Amino acid sequence: MLYPKITCSRYLVNLSGVWNFKADYEEEGYKNLWYKNGLKDYELMAVPASFNDITVDARLRDFVGDVWYEKKIVISKHWQEENVFIRVGSASHNSKIWINGILVKEHIGGFLPFESNVNNEIKSGEENHIVICVNNELTWQTLPPGESYYFEDVEGNKKKKLKQQHDFFNYGGIHRPVYLYSTPKTYIEDIIVKTDFEENLGIIHYEVIANEIAEEIKIEVFDEENQLVADSIGASGKIEINNVKLWKPNNAYLYEFVANIYSNLKLIDQYNLNIGIRKVQVVDGQFLINNEPFYFKGFGKHEDMDVKGKGLDDAINIRDFNLLKWINANSFRTSHYPYAEEVLDLADRYGVVIIGEVPAVGMLGKAVPAVGELDGVFTENKINNETLKEHIRVTREMIARDKNHPSVVMWSLANEASVMEPNAEPYFQKLVEETRKMDDRPLLNVNLMLIEPGKCKVSKFFDVIGLNLYFGWYSERGDIDSGKKRLIKWLRDCYKADKKPILLAEYGVDTVAGLHKEPAIMFSEEFQVQFLKAYHEIFDQLPFVIGEHVWNFADFMTGQDIVRVDGNKKGVFTRQRQPKMAAHYLRERWGNVENTYTKQLYVGGEE
Ligand code: GCB
């Protein structure tokens, strides 16, 4: 799915801003036809933003159910001749859109875009009534899974609540921009670009998909100086670029790929895409970018901030990329869901390597942070065949959206699923099989520390194993030394069992900014530094460890719980994006660890 943009043949209207808004506390919206009759007694709401932290009303912050958004807009009469689409960047989690009282789109899933052609429903040159209903409930058949239920207090009052296993606040609302955009009647629906190179020759395999057979399709490729470096005719083909400049981690080079559709020698539609030429492989236990080993230095992140929650914010996003550069990081995982396309555009430009994750988080018999025995969830009425279908569908949506981003080097198909269960094996086998048909990037599965070495039933299907390890924090609490001993044994045992390169996908500790203790204790800034240093001493001894992603880039909001003080405080930066002591330590370490860091060459099963 192409991101909407203005080109010589397309136009768009950004509907971000202030919308009418109403939370449906009494569950009356559908009954009273709000989508047709409009909202009465509404309040004002920002789009894009989560609705939860905008007001001072705890009932709205914790609301579970339908919220309604409404906007009235006149569109140009010139759009009569065009195709018109409405497109929502994302809304959490399930949405419906009505134009002038007519349902035009339903979408399940909170982190990916959805759109609909509205030629028949929209009135050019007149006022249009747009209503979007967003529901923030989850089930065992959604990604992420969860369960809503009615809680009854001692007086018999009922309230809808959500039970979730994942450790971040279940923000709801329209999180990414809403656009109305136009295309010509014959238009480019999609572009697929795959790149490679041989010595100095860059290679682009492309496919341009139009909604109807186009007479002529012409491709032009421009370099960063806006010079035409190659062109081609036809809906698909191979383009070669001499003296290619590769897209490299921390050193991005982007070409502009321009697709043009002609009819009777007249340009009908044009779409331009930034592309990077690079190659990714996992070979002999190494992660290779452009045939060079790549060592991941960076973080698991969240889309999360004060007031806006998960609402797209360019200022925060650019600040984050500046901080990543400052701290000498080269990568991050979009834990635990696909981030905004605007974020991936920045990653392409800053040369930050991305692991794109589907929202398969919390496929677990306990809420995170989980300790003790886990109940089975790969069962008939929990994670079942319907969930698998949804998992495949969402993965397909993510790949369809993100496939052309050079920054995205790997897909993460799950975080902390209950993969020691026998039923997890056929589930993941099928998921991986289907995903490999969609794209050829390496695949990652991320395991929690309750899955003991050798107990993961699904590692064999994946290219890289991610581990989330917190010894010295969730176990050996406060005892970094003992945690470190367990860590090295654990990593060696995991490698022996699975023989796959290991990415430390999460390790870290909650740290209250400004809390200093000598000797260090849990939650102090000193403890965070000592913990990270101890882990790095181990990683540096193990050649099969191909990267380190600290949990987390910044403090983030979670549900209320006795183990969370105003959210999760494992950030190396505060929620306001200021450094803790550990940020200075990481900056120094990562300044000395090359992107191509390898510890020693090894073959097959040996370290
Ligand atoms: C994990 C989860 C992450 C949590 C983190 C923690 O393993 O993947 O979502 O936030 O632990 O801080 O407990």
Image (cartoon, rainbow, N blue to C red):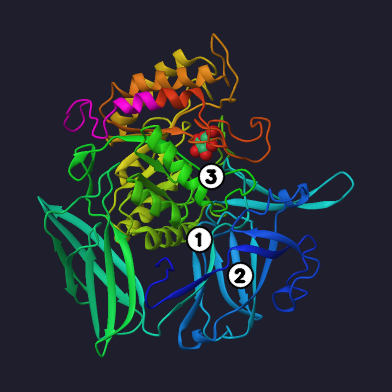
| Precedes in sequence: disc 2 or disc 1 | 2
Circles 2 and 1: CB distance less than 8 Å?
no
Residue 386 - label = 1
Q: For marks 1 and 3, give the one nearer the viewer.
A: 3
Please say if 518 is above or below 82. Answer: above
Residue 362 - label = 3
Residue 150 lies in the magenta-colored region: no
Crowd rating for badge 2 (residues with CA inside 10 Å; few <14, some 14–19, many 20+): some
The residue shown at (59%, 34%) is 568
| Residue 493 in sight | no
- Name the residue tied to disc 2: 96
Which quadrant of the figure contains the C terminus? top left
Q: Amino acid at mark 1?
A: Glu
- Choose top left, top right, bottom left or bottom right for residue 190: bottom left
Please say if 538 is above or below 208. Answer: above
| Residue 576 in sight | yes
* Image: magenta residue range: 587-607
The image shows residue 443 at horizontal and vertical percentages of 33, 48
Crowd rating for badge 3 (residues with CA inside 10 Å; few <14, some 14–19, many 20+): many
Q: Amino acid at mark 2?
A: Lys
